Image (spheres, rainbow, N blue to C red):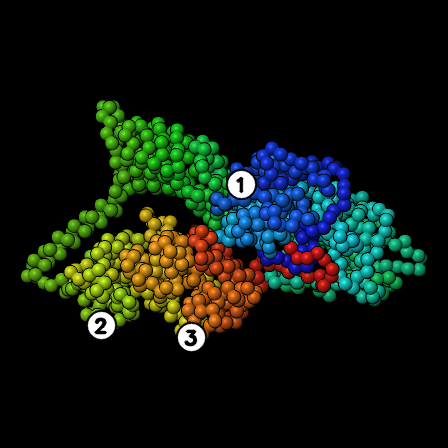
Amino acid sequence: MEVLELFLSAVLAAAFCLSPSLVHAQDQSGFISIDCGITEGSSYNDKITGIRYISDENYTDAGVNKNISPKINTTGIDKQYLNLRSFPDGNKICYTLKPLRSKNKYLIRAGFLYGNYDELDDVPKFDLYLGVNWWETVTLTDASTPFTTEIVHLLSSDSIDICLVNTGFGTPFISVLELRLLDDRTHSNVSQLVVGRVGCGLALSHLIRFSVDVYDRIWSPFRLQDWEVKQTSYAIESPDDDKYGVPSAIMQGAAVPINQSDPIVLPITRDDPTTQVFLYLHFAEIENLPENQTREFNIYVNNKLWRGPIVPQYLQRTTVSSITALEGSEITVSIEKTINSTLPPLINAIELYLVRKLLQAETYEDDVHAVMNIKSYYKVKRYWQGDPCGPKTARWQGLNCSYDAYDPPRITSLDLSSSGLTGEISPDIFNLKMIQYLDLSNNSLRGSIPDFLSHLPYLRVLNLSENELSGSVPSELNERSKNGTLILNVEKNKLLCSSDCKNKAIVPVVATVIPVVILVLIAVSIFWFCKRRNQDTNSGGVNEHTRAPKLNERHFSYSEVLTITTNFGTILGEGQFARVYHGYVDRTQVAVKIFSPSVAQAYKQFSDDAKLLTRVHHRNLVTCFGYCDEDSNRALIFEHMINGNLEHILLDRNANILSWQERLQIAKDVAQGLQYLHDGCRPPIIHGNLKPTNILLNENFQAKLADFGLSKILTIEGSTREYIDPEYYVTSKLTERSDVYSFGVVLLAIIASRPVIDGDQEQAHIIQWASTLLGRGDIKGIVDSRLQGDYLLDSVWKAVELAMACASRASIKRPAMTQVVMALNHCLAMEISRVDRSEGTIEMVSVNFGTGVVPQAR
């Protein structure tokens, strides 16, 4: 969520900017107060609040302690913000807080101050999760201004995970984390983000928290310019059945309109009409009115009577609150005196909360216990923290999960290969009942292969190779591998027997059993080979080009290429090194890339590259059906992409305009293709020539990458310079981060529908052009004007920031493609939600109580 305006700022910034009154320590039972980044074992009492802060050593096992830069002005900075814990490694890092009281409500508060601790002058942005559900996006305005967020949450168990998720925009960190046990009557049972909690009569330099507020809620001053403040020194009593616990010190001041005939107006504006808020208004008469004076008022919401008439009692608090959440794109609360009232309305304190719907289910409990025990048994050295499967974009490394709209996620894949495992195969694996893929290869596991592996009903792949296992392979596993229901690999276990060890004839076992389907394919291939030979013999040696080749063939003759293209009859495109022709293979449209003779002669590794292309398959990579390598004739046969290349779609003003959602989907397709090349191929494949002309679109506008995996001579010399990683010209080396740079440039082109080099612009390169507009805050100037504002602005911001991060000149600052895909998923989800609702933004609230005097925005 973006920074909320005046009212939210008044509360959350005040926790840092204002000075609370000196208090004495009181009961802190139900409190957890963590100063993140202080020395292990250390603790202290805060000099102002008396709250005892402890180290975070018992709550997380990741990260490094850091101090903010001494160049930052520390005047007025709370001690908790002078240090922090940074998490340079791991995608998701969690604090596990326990033991807590299950079925009780807690106020959870997290604070962040960057303080240029790493001397990079690069303020990070990352996501904060409550368990598996998104809580907030930590968005700091600068190095010296804090970001604080609070949420009221009903616990379902005796623990809670507070997780920081790296979204590719800098290293996550945290300064302070606090939990406060609340009275269960204070809020509804839905989770609520604290938008504002203010005292309308507090002095502008005053802040109330513990121990004046026994729950350590932060109350800050707030007023509008047309308000007058009245105060009393007498205590304000609470009702006998009080469930709100508003401190007397908050209620001893009140605001009234300067013009006594005016109402008190509180406008709450929001961009998302479906977001719900709870409102609490607190009143107390602080003047001992004479008999001829009365104060009576009604409360209206959007000009409809909400509560009233209300007559506040002298020195006694009255609270008016939402029974159900208020909803609407604009909510105007108006407090107006009745016709019988001689005095204007007043208000002492306001609380505003945003309903945060936490709908993502946690991983199935038995699966969690099983994988936690596996982690403990093997002492797994990975950043396995928080929920194994959630959030989906930050599940544990080595895990895959199934996600259903109604049921909790289940673990379906566990990859612990090359993880330094010792001991026997853990029996807790048997409790992963839905597991389909299990890889424990290349470790030092000993003992026998347990029978329980035979009884995992959904197990389809089992890799136990390169261990020190002994004994016999269980007969049921052997049987399942033979009938093709299990792919089993137990090779390179020197003490393992193929079936039984009665004869003590221990032999190396290679149990990678070829599935039945592969055997059938081999038989079919032999059959067709023999049939073809017979046909050629019987026909007296008919030329090969008279026979239509099959799609499953990989090596085409030049005569077959001529047949496929009808003697090169229809050209689809032409580049520096090749021409592309339209053709048919078995009634399937194909594109045939014919390399020029000069390139064909120099391209010595063509055959190896071509064979690689035919083996790489992904939904976002153009499929290579085969190749021709005959004398000096070299060609590649690809699937035909009917909508051509992305550059044509972006720059042709006669083409259909891509919507913002379609642009994000195309960008995600491209990112997923690169992610597969980098992470799904062994060894990784570097594209090296990513640009819009090498991004092709099928009939559904699904984007697929072309020209990947070709020789370096064809990637670099054939690349357009403006897409190439600047570091290449220094190192002469291409890396995965080189592709990330190219993707950043492409993403900007997708957003802007603009040439990467524009000679008419002062900043010719698209990166320079976008940087200039960003410096002015002109995000709308970057987006294709033809969209006419039909997009979620927050989604655009995130996409542009992602593009600029990818296109960083220093490769170390660029995110990995995994992080890029995660960020684009986030952008796309927000835009899809907007489109589904036809208007508004997602998770975006703007609260504006006028132009009153409040602390500066956080």
Element assignment for label 3: loop
Q: Is residue 843 above or below residue 434?
A: below
Residue annotated with mark 2? 569
Q: How far apart are labels 3 and 1 at the CA level?
A: 52 Å
Taking the spot 32% from the left edge, 57% from the top edge, the residue there is 708
Residue annotated with mark 1? 64
> Label 3 sits on what residue type?
Arg
Mark 1 surroundings: few (<14), some (14-19) or many (≥20) residues within 10 A? some
**Left or right for 264, reference 731:** right
> Of tags 3 and 1, which is closer to the observer?
1
Element assignment for label 1: strand
> Label 1 sits on what residue type?
Val
**Left or right for 401, reference 597:** right
The image position of residue 705, as x and y in percent, is 35, 60
Disc 3 and disc 2 in contact, CB within 8 angstroms: no
Indicate which disc, 1 or 2, sits on the residue closer to the N terminus. Answer: 1
Q: How many marks?
A: 3
Find the residue positioned furthest to the right.
Answer: 291
Residue annotated with mark 3? 653
Question: Quarter holding the C terminus?
Answer: bottom right
Taking the spot 25% from the left edge, 44% from the top edge, the residue there is 516
Question: Quarter holding the N terminus?
Answer: bottom right
Q: Is residue 579 above or below residue 290?
A: below
- Residue 617 is drawn in which quadrant? bottom left
> Of tags 1 and 2, which is closer to the observer?
1
Taking the spot 22% from the left edge, 72% from the top edge, the residue there is 569
Indicate which disc, 3 or 1, sits on the residue closer to the N terminus. Answer: 1
Taking the spot 59% from the left edge, 43% from the top edge, the residue there is 67
- Residue 200 is drawn in which quadrant? bottom right
The image position of residue 839, as x and y in percent, is 57, 65
